[in-house]
Image (cartoon, grey):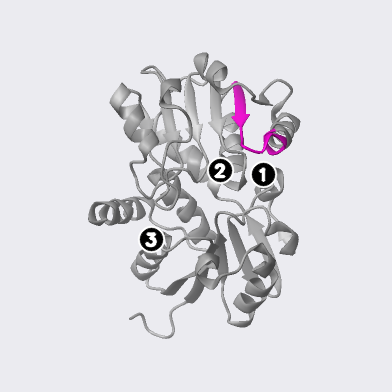
Amino acid sequence: MPPASQPSFLIGLIGAGIQASRTPALHEHEGAAQGFRYCYRLIDTERLGVGPEALPELLRAAELMGFSGLNVTHPFKQSVIPHLTELSDDARALGAVNTVVLKGGHRIGHNTDGWGFAESFRRGLPDAALDLVVQLGAGGAGAAVAHALLAIGAKRLVVFDTDHARAEALAERLEARFGEGRARAGDDLESALGGADGLVHATPTGMAGHPGLPLPAACLRPDLWVAEIVYFPLETELLREAGRLGCRTLDGGGMAVFQAVGAFRLFTGTVPDEARMIRDFAAMARGA
């Protein structure tokens, strides 16, 4: 145990069905390595039996108990925004928050998902073609991933969501930021994928609690690269099917690590050791 004179941090993760999350251990391991008193707790609304209506109470409780910050995950990355006092430029542009710093009565919303995905993609699929990319999911994580894709060079992005209006709203925000013709909401997935270089999956489908494929397997083809944001399990049914066909694939582990790198830096003001966090995550994955 680090001495009491060392910096201490109490952090939480708000989400639904998050008992399998590796984020707490990832943060606590890095905190210990930095010599901090670092405690990370799950605030699982599914276990608590509450929904988005409880967010104001949960945020207030975290402040009263002295939390330094909170991570926010599915399904609250967008619904948490009205309850915050400030937003970073990235969070405002994305319309989604995954990290809240609690300081001096302020609730400052940030988004490290976009940078996390971009860093993972650059390392995992460095030479992937990006003329046309299809994305499934326009929620909080999907918004961050979509912005990241255009920022790292995707020329055109077609976004699909079960809520078509949400996909349209995201496409409008993307065009406002990156230029006309860069993004659109899709209505024919098979046709869009037929001319695409890659597919990015950004919905909960494939998570331990939401098994299955997010699209018909017949839509995949060997020359399509496939990137996933789900990391538990690390090999989702989508990645398993894509790998069987010979597609180049990227699992969600890298995004999970790098978004945590960004959040740790915001919570502590200290630069974490990226290589160490990657090794810690890989060790946890092997032990799953």
Q: Residue 107 in magenta?
A: no
Pointer 1: what residue? 94
- The residue that label 3 is drawn on is 26
Amino acid at dot 3: Leu
In this rendering, the answer to whether 191 lies above or below 18 is: above
Magenta residue span: 155-167
| Along the line of sight, the residue nearer the viewer: 49 or 31 | 49
2 or 3: tag closer to the N-terminus: 3
- Amino acid type of the residue that numbered disc 2 sits on in the rendered structure: Gly
List the single residue furthest toward the bottom. 4
> If you read the primary sequence from the N terminus, does the residue marked by circle 1 or circle 3 appear first?
3
> Given contact means CB atoms under 8 Å apart, are the residues at marks 1 and 2 in contact?
yes
Circle 2 SS class: helix
Residue 109, label in figure: none
Q: Which residue sits at x=24%, y=52%?
A: 286
Disc 1 secondary structure class: helix
Image quarter hosting the C terminus? bottom left
Q: Amino acid at mark 1?
A: Leu
Crowding at label 1, few (<14), some or many (≥20) Cα neighbours within 10 Å?
many
Mark 2 lies on residue: 114
Residue 265: give x, y in percent of width and height: 51, 59
Q: Is residue 50 visible?
A: yes
Mark 2–mark 3 Cα distance, whole angstroms, equals 19 Å
Q: Give the Cα distance between marks 1 and 3.
A: 25 Å
Q: Which of the marked residues, 1 or 2, is nearer the chain's N terminus?
A: 1
- Tell me which residue sits at (34%, 45%) in the image: 234
User: Helix, strand or loop at disc 3?
Assistant: helix
Residue 110 percent across, percent down from the top left: 62, 55
Q: Is residue 34 left or right of residue 42?
A: left
- Residue found at x 67% / y 76%: 60
